[in-house]
Image (cartoon, rainbow, N blue to C red):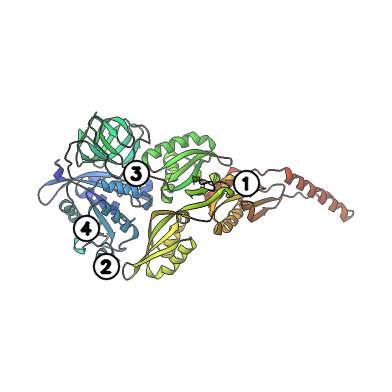
Amino acid sequence: MATELTRNFSIIAHIDHGKTTLSDRLLEFTKTISDREKQDQLLDAMDLEREKGITIKSHPVAMEYQAKDGKTYRLNLLDTPGHVDFSYEVARSLAACEGAILMIDAAQGVEAQTLANLHLAMDQNLVIIPVLNKIDLPAADVDKCKHQLEDILAIPAEEAIPASAKNGIGIEDILEAVVQRVPPPKEMDDDLLRASVFDSVYDAFRGVISYVRVFSGSIRKRQKIKLFAANKTYEVKECGVFTPKMLARDELIAGDVGYVIANMKSADEAKIGDTVTDATHSAPEPLPGYKEIQPMVFSGIYPVDSSDYEALKMAMAKLQINDAAFTYMSESSTALGFGFRCGFLGLLHMEIIQERLRREFNMDVISTYPSVIYKVTKTNGEEVVVDNPSFLPEPQEIEEIREPMVRCFIMIPGDFIGDVMALVMEKRGELTHTETMDETRVMLTCELPLSEILVDFNDRLKSMTRGYGSMDYEHADYRPAKMVKMDMLIAGEPVEAFSTIVHRDKAEGYGRALAVRLKDVIPQQLFVVAIQACIGGKIIASERISAMRKNVTAKCYGGDITRKRKLLEKQKKGKEKMKAFGKVSIPQEAFIKVLKSGD
């Protein structure tokens, strides 16, 4: 099909504003799928996506639509993930488009991620088509949403299309707007092949499948291609488009969105954002925008059964091909055996990877408490990067520790501003800016340490604002902080699995809570066991597990009390001797219980 009849667009929205439902309606209206193939959340292939109601992997699809002007257009829809953890994937998908449908829930209005995704689209100079979804709901307030469009997003209200993806209202208007407002792909002067890889998946039979948008030139079967970042040459085995199933084509031309299967076998080769070009007639430079994705959150993942180590290694290698942002490297722990130190984009990303390991590969895994990357300046001027407490230098060698900060945008109803500000202060954050969005809502801009928002920040924000609060964050700079390494001593021996880097002001509370949890799960010994949290040589929290006692006086009947006392003293000496030589063997179940309750 001619390039001027091609339209490439994406759908961006806050989580649960109806993005995937709209994709389903567009596929039905354009008869891309038959009635027999119909199902809800068609583009969400994973069970996990359906259950959580979020898009994890982006799914492109090509549709044919006969517009009111009589011409038939090819519409390439690039569905994008909605969560903040996947913002790089969203940015790469948007770079492959010329337009974006911005969906706003008519009952909820503009939310934090609506703004974040809109800024990503504007950075790519995309044409924005605003759609007010869910207008059929009793709580829908279309006029308020139109005011928000103009006041908050600076988009003319008359451009907004009222719709209901669930009931199919306004679908034709949206398709017509895409045809009329979104420009066709621009053609470059030369015919050299340039295609951007915006996603990749792994197929057990065919290897790596790269999703590409062709900007110039064409890709054909048996053509020799080169990837700029990997700097390797491959032969194209198959290329084609999505309908939404993969449909093989002889070639992909400029403006097309499709897939390429080459003889790629390794995860490191198919990088999101990389540029594909012809091996013999290469483009002089790659397309802009590519960057290496840096993980922000680290956690150890270990198999519960140590014999599953090799199987877990294979599972992680396959997951990494499907998810370029996920990194892993081998590590071992005296408590948990052999496992992996894994890097993630954020906490949701970590949760998804663990769930996929359990479901898709039947792996029974345990993860350690999530940590972030600290930058440490030593007294000799050397800078080291620390993502694991065991790698932190000794206190006397440390000049300064800097922790990663995030700039957090929190959108809440005005009634809850006091509670949310108290939460931000509790998490060592500071409020930098307050902006009134409309008569009921405000947006707070705060700076917080990344480590503080990892575990329960979003859950607490949702519960204290009755579900109306929404947040989005971006990574800010590193800032000096009073971070210390806290060790847990059990019977005087440090246990590496429970070591953590915490802020000095919060160390005591965290150490006391962990000591109480350990007291509940470590079995009783024949001698008293001390559980101590310590920083350097200073003990900041302590618990005791009392010894198991045998009733040594049971055989003693009659006679003087001194006979019983003599037996008890003898037992006491035995306990002291046992305490001096005894070792506490912590069963793996205890580690699993403590680490899981710490999630």
Q: Most extreme residue toward the front, as rendered?
A: 380
Is the Cβ of the residue at disc 1 closer than 8 Å to that at disc 2? no
Cα–Cα gap, marks 1 and 2: 59 Å
Cα–Cα gap, marks 4 and 2: 20 Å
- Residue under numbered circle 4: 169
Q: What secondary structure is marked by label 2? A: helix
Cα–Cα gap, marks 3 and 1: 40 Å
Q: Amino acid at mark 4?
A: Ile
Q: Amino acid at mark 1?
A: Pro
Give the mark, 1 or 2, whose residue is nearer the N terminus: 2
Q: Amino acid at mark 2?
A: Lys
Work out whether 344 lies above or below 314: below
User: Which numbered tag is attached to residue 494?
Assistant: 1
Q: What secondary structure is marked by label 4? A: loop
User: Which numbered tag is attached to residue 291?
Assistant: 3
Q: Amino acid at mark 3?
A: Lys
Q: What secondary structure is marked by label 3? A: loop
The mark lying in front, picked from 4 and 1, is 1
Give the mark, 3 or 1, whose residue is nearer the N terminus: 3
* Crowd band around label 4 with a 10 angstrom C-alpha radius: few (<14), some (14–19), many (20+): some
Residue 191 placement (x, y as % from top left)? 18, 36
Cα–Cα gap, marks 4 and 1: 63 Å
Is the Cβ of the residue at disc 2 closer than 8 Å to that at disc 3? no
Work out whether 114 lies above or below 278: below
Give the mark, 4 or 2, whose residue is nearer the N terminus: 2
Residue 253 placement (x, y as % from top left)? 19, 38
- Residue under numbered circle 2: 144
* Crowd band around label 1 with a 10 angstrom C-alpha radius: few (<14), some (14–19), many (20+): some
